[in-house]
Amino acid sequence: MDQGPDFIAGVPPQRIAQLAEREASRYRSARPRAAAALAEGARAFLEGVPMHWMRDWPMPFLPLVAEARGAKITDIDGHELDDFCLGDTGSMFGHSPAPVARAIRQQSRRGLTYMLPTEAALEAGRLLSDRFGPFKWQIATTATDANRFALRVARAVTGRKKVLVFNGCYHGTVDDTMVALEDGRTVARPGLVGQAADLTQTAVAVEFNDLAGVEAALQSGEIAAVLTEPVMTNSCMVLPRADFHAGLRNLTRAHGALLIIDETHTISSGLGGYTRVHGLEPDIFVVGKCVAGGMPTAVWGLSAEVAARFAAYDASRPAGHSGMGTTLSANPMQFACLKATLAEVMTPRAYATMEKGAERLARGLTRVLRDHGAPWHVVRVGARVEFICAPGPLKNGAEAARAHQPMLEAAIHTALVNRGCLIAPFHNMMLISPATRPGQIDRLILAFDEILTELFA
């Protein structure tokens, strides 16, 4: 396969452009109701979308969802989509799992928020420890909030101000994590809106899988915590090398820094997330997205040792606002949904089904790549699968950035939608839910094969 300068990931740019133009036209023709509704109703929103990142979807315009059930979405033009995006993990267990929908109906009759706990809150706390480990828990609304609060605790108990993150990471919209590594130096990421503070004063960026780089940064004595995902996601996915997590744990302990594990995406790894599956030992554990079955909820937990250190700090600090917490967090609806998800949805059987389906998908996509001689690869973490338009495996964030091919990926995405398959708009991510059927997986593989047949003709 020719991969010279006139090719993008082995494909002639003209062929990508032709595919993109044809599929965009096909998409527009198939969705007149959505086009008309958006033309009339989207003007009330800034740039025509309720949340600015919705512009990242590569289709000519957004579909408008009529309903979502299980692993299917139906839009207002009557198209059914096999949903492999699943709300970018927010609905990883399927849309409106029956126990969660039932919990919402029941709790809605008893009130939505009142700044006081319920018996369901107590049960949810027990279930959190059963699923993820014996942490001391706090509830937030988003993983962004949870990570932000966790960093405050880490700085409080260590007396240090900097956080170490990995180049190309994503931990929500936490200011301190919006840094990159350029020519060996930590810099603010380009494109940040309204950025005023110098982020290099509170953050250090190192390449993922680079234990020597981590050690060098920790030797400064300024690092309060290392904040990491077990696997790099929200980029072209990067797996940890075999010794990485053990080395990371040993180095943080040796240098007095805390280890924060953010499992918001890697909860796909299996029951209890990557941490439980692989026996990691974080000081602070964070997970959000699907933990309450789609109800906006995140949790963060402190190890017993860090909880004791924070209690001592908290008792000695001046009276005043902690800078942590939001009014609607830890509301009774969250606890009702947490309890239902942890007890009845996030089960060993569910994960077994998801793993089996994800293996079927990864195997099928790999076969398609091999059949077409595509210089790409497939990577899987539990129920999460990605095809990456470059050879692999990738070792760090810099390689992940180079592997990203926006023009090619956008064309493939729209072509898949036109064939009834929705994947995430970010980095070709696909999830398998307990509701995903083998026929849906096979349709996605067949659609992928059809598209690559044209690209690699």
Image (spheres, helix red, strand yellow):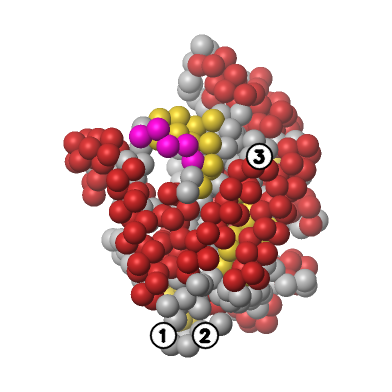
Q: From where the camera sits, is residue 288 visible?
A: no
Q: Looking at numbered disc 3 in the image, what kind of residue is underneath it?
A: Arg
* Labelled disc at residue 410: none
Badge 2 is on which residue? Answer: 2
Label 3: few (<14), some (14–19) or many (≥20) C-alpha neighbours in 10 Å: some
Q: Which one is nearer the viewer's eye here, 376 or 132?
A: 376
**Inter-mark Cα distance, 2 to 1:** 9 Å
Q: Are marks 2 and 1 in contact (CB under 8 Å)?
A: yes
* Labelled disc at residue 6: 1
Label 1: few (<14), some (14–19) or many (≥20) C-alpha neighbours in 10 Å: few
Could you tell me residue 375's position as x and y percent? 58, 76
For the magenta stretch, what is the residue range?
A: 77-81
Q: Image point 74% across, 41% down: which residue?
A: 353
- The kind of secondary structure the magenta stretch mainly shows is loop
Badge 3 is on which residue? Answer: 437
**Inter-mark Cα distance, 3 to 2:** 37 Å
Could you tell me residue 259's position as x and y percent? 67, 61
Local secondary structure at mark 1: loop
On the image, which quarter does residue 45 sit in? top left
Q: Image point 64% across, 36% down: which residue?
A: 435
Local secondary structure at mark 2: loop
